Image (cartoon, rainbow, N blue to C red):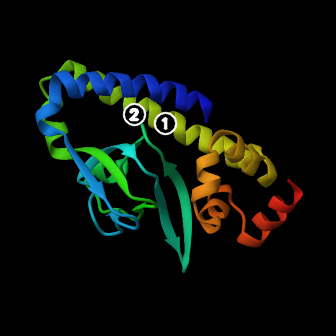
Amino acid sequence: MMLYKNYATSVLKDLKTAIDEQIADFVELVKFPKNTLLLSPGQRNLYYYVVETGILVNYYMRDTEEVVTSFTFPGDIVADFRTAVFKVKSTDYIKALSPVTVYRISVADFDMLKKDNTILLALERKLIIAYTLLLDERLRFIQHTTALERYQFLMDHYPQLISTVSTRYIASYIGVKVETLSRIRGKI
């Protein structure tokens, strides 16, 4: 997940430049309280968000269980790209795990602006590459490491996650039951 992080950092610098120079009039700063749902199943993703402060979680429901697919931290971009690009309804949730402050631009505004702007088209391409890297690294993270290694990685690289996020979300993210996570924590 470090390749994604390094690439995403450079993309976010480009995004900041684009916001400052190209799309500032279309970007707004919004605050959401803890537990706010920015997206729910059945809705369409209407915004791209860049997190300024706080932590968000993306998840879907399997029976009565929340299955965590990602966490979003300050500096990260969050959206349900399937719904934004293909204009379909979401099957996922995006939820604020703490009070959050985000910059957002509507998908419709971004789509309109990029039609005549090669800088924004290049930025979108970079965002797609960053998202592809994230998915690839997440897949490798799950398939090529043990649950203990996954938890250790979170401890080493995302200590704020371990100290602030519910155990059930962490367990779901690393692909184990809460009881298994408790045993893993006992070994460390």
SS under mark 1: helix
Q: Nearer the viewer, residue 177 or 62?
A: 177
Q: Is 139 positioned to the left or the right of 97 in the image? A: right
Q: Residue at 35% of width from left, 27% of height from top?
A: 125
Residue 182 vertical position relative to residue 3 in the rendered view, above or below:
below
Type of amino acid under label 2: Ile
Between 129 and 28, the one lying in front of the other is 28
Q: How many marks?
A: 2
Q: Are marks 2 and 1 in contact (CB under 8 Å)?
A: yes
Identify the element where label 2 is drawn: helix
Instruction: Say which quarter of the image contains residue 118.
Output: top left
Residue 128, label in figure: 2
Q: Residue at x 64, y 60 (%)?
A: 170
Which of the 4 image quadrants contains residue 119? top left
Residue 183 location in percent, x, y? Answer: 84, 65
Taking the spot 82% from the left edge, 60% from the top edge, the residue there is 184
Q: Amino acid at mark 1?
A: Thr
On the question of residue 85 being in view, the answer is no
Disc 1: which residue: 132
Dot 2: within a 10 Å radius of its alpha carbon, few (fewer than 14), some, or many (20 or more) residues? Answer: few
> Does 9 sit above or below residue 39?
above
**Which quadrant of the structure image shows residue 16?**
top left
* Residue at figure coordinates x 57%, y 58% from the top left: 164
Nearer-the-camera pick, 68 or 62: 68
